[in-house]
Amino acid sequence: MQSGKSVFQPGQNCWVESKARFSTPLIDCGNYYKALHSSIVKAKHSIFIVGWDIDSRIRLLRGDDEVNSEAPSVISDLLKWKAEQNPDIKIYLLRWDSSLAFFAQREMWAKEVWEEKTPDNVQTELDDTIPMGGSQHQKIVVIDDELVFSGGMDVSTNRWDTRDHPVVSEERDGPDGEYGPLHDVQMVSSGPVVADFSKLVRWRWQRVADSSPIDIREDARIDENAPLPDAWPQDYPPLFEDVECALARTIPFMDEVEPAQEVRHMLLDLIGEAESVIYIENQFTTRQEIAEALNKQLKLEPNLSVIIVSSYEPKGKFECEAFWASRIEFKGILEKGIDPKRVKLTYSSIEDMQGRKAYKRIHSKVMTIDNKYLVIGSSNLSNRSMTLDTEIDTVLFGNTKDNQACIEQVRNDLLAEHTGRDIDAMPALFNNEYPVEALMQDQIAHGYVLTEVRDEVFTEQSVKNVFRALSDPEEPLISVPTFDGAAMPARNPRRRSIMILIGLAIIAVLGGLMFWASQSIPWLSSDSINAFLEKSRGTYFALPTVLLVYVVGGVLFFPVTVLSLAVAAIFGPIWGPIYGIMGALMSSAIMFGIGKLSGNAGLRKIGGPKVAAVDEKLKRSGIVGVAAIRMLPVAPFSLVNLVAGISSIGIFQFLVGTFLGMFPPMIAKGLVGDSIAQIWQNPSVETISYLVGGIVLWGLMIWGSQKFARYYQARKESGNQDTASDNSDKDEVEKCAA
């Protein structure tokens, strides 16, 4: 049975009007990732993933699903496995290029990471065409041009959770440790609408890539009578069938692309259609125009109720002052002149039997209008989502009684989760005179409950401020004048450019500090150090003095060769090398510890996969590798110590390698350094012979220590192999016994 005509107007409030043969929401990331894994495994021809982020480390499966799966769970391993299993498949990954605001959350060298981990039929590009201040916010996966995932979810860190949202979960583990409950919604669809998404992702790809993607399949089964596609995810039967839909975009003005504010116009038009219940769940609610439209419709329709679910607490100062302060204003506009029984802006939280509290983070972007429309998309109710970011929302129209019932079911299912109720209890609540008041009352103890937001506990209502201007702008932060007098939005700086600038800044700061120290600290010179050491010769303070000089010199990146020659010249060919190696080892250990405090992941995060590969080789070569670096220094002494601490090599291996690499040259320098002093004071055949002999001995000791280090490493590796072989034999015996 048909149910009226939709408000869809292509070119006005939507890009295209279409139809989904089948569609079903995927609520929370545990379900989405499982469904995505299933469809990737089934893919035959092509995979397009477009996202705010595509993190190579994400596990798509958990628990028994992960244990029982024949395909890898981590997405980079999964796509590598799929690409190697089917060399003819084409896989395209389009991720937003880095932003300074999200450096800590995202893989810093994403393109290089993906290229290292996957074969040639997996291509990766970073989208750097978005105007400065905006972001690539569309979240789309198209498989075989027959299936599309779209909505609010990325393959990113701190996203995975299950529908029960436990207070504590070992599986909710991100780069910064455990994170709290998180709620999101995605949708999987097939049918004619997939063709529109296929065009969109290819258009996005061609804007940034040098090569064109594979053509859209002419034999793709996307007609209105097509069966479920082969790639449809297992365990997720379709909810909607033959549902009319529209795609609404936000496209900012960029590179002469025609901008679009279809999302903005669509939401305003949908609100104007509401008669009974508007349900919204959204990460951010700051757009005053939306609040005004809701308030106007509440006054026009006396039987209308509005319930909004968002998050409780802000993350950081920028989010607090940009979005939470604006939410105070949004709430005030929304509720002005309206009976509080008809409208509530809420958050969902829980206090379990042990008294532990948790606040559910809302990342979804959902809206239902009565039982007529369901919006699942990427757009927040914020300024940036309406004008500056790239967005895509799918709007389903309840064109039949069955699809109207499905819209009610989705709304009731979501609200049942947020209020700790069973879905069967929801229809009675909406039959109440005041559904919003009924939802807020009689909620179950120790389950999730809705509570009205009171953002004044976090911030005060404020006028526009710098936080809001940077975090929730309507226009690009910077525009560049063109030759014809117009203004072109400046792009966000590329991740590579940012990294180069950061590197140059660090080098400039270190260089400036070293220059300042050499000019401002009178004792930081060879003559002053020699004089300082000379005073301690023959006293009980000789060794402590040498150790102090090496430690301070290491922190200030003073050349270790200068220190070693000075110690050798002052303390002679025996005690000079002994004192010198002790000082070098102490300095190495301290700088190594400073590096270690930065975290073992630091080197990979900053240096990318190439440096990570070198780090891995250094770890495998162990003592030999460190000894080689010490004997043939490729970088300043203190820098090697610092980087070694950041890397994954152990302190024992590092110090042993340092000893083997530095002690022979130290002995030779003792002879050479002492000989230089003697030659300067009393040149003779004897002193010159000492100098020549010391240089020869230096070379022989380097050669001998390298041989010994290689022998030691070979013995160690052989022992590891024997142990592995013994363990393997033991396993075989146990299997036979079983």
Image: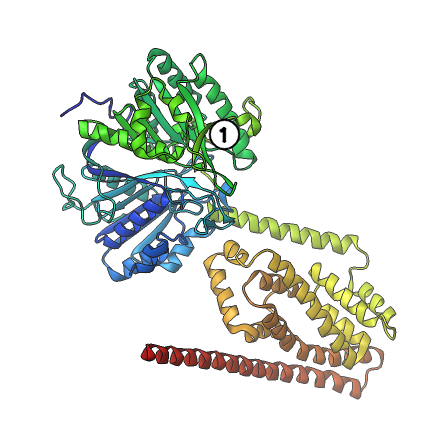
- Disc 1: which residue: 323
Q: Is residue 44 above or below residue 628?
A: above
Relative to 692, is 40 on the left or the right? left
| Residue 119 visible in rendering | no
| Residue at 56 percent of width and 83 percent of height | 707
Q: Quadrant of the N terminus?
A: top left
For disc 1, the neighbor class at 10 Å (few under 14, some 14 to 19, many from 20) is many
- In the rendered image, residue 692, in percent from the top left (x then y), is placed at 71, 84
- In the rendered image, residue 374, in percent from the top left (x then y), is placed at 28, 29
Q: Quadrant of the C terminus?
A: bottom left
| Residue at 13 percent of width and 36 percent of height | 224
Q: Image quadrant of residue 69?
A: bottom left
| Residue at 18 percent of width and 46 percent of height | 229
| Residue at 49 percent of width and 21 percent of height | 329
Q: Is residue 122 above or below residue 444?
A: below
Q: Amino acid at mark 1?
A: Phe
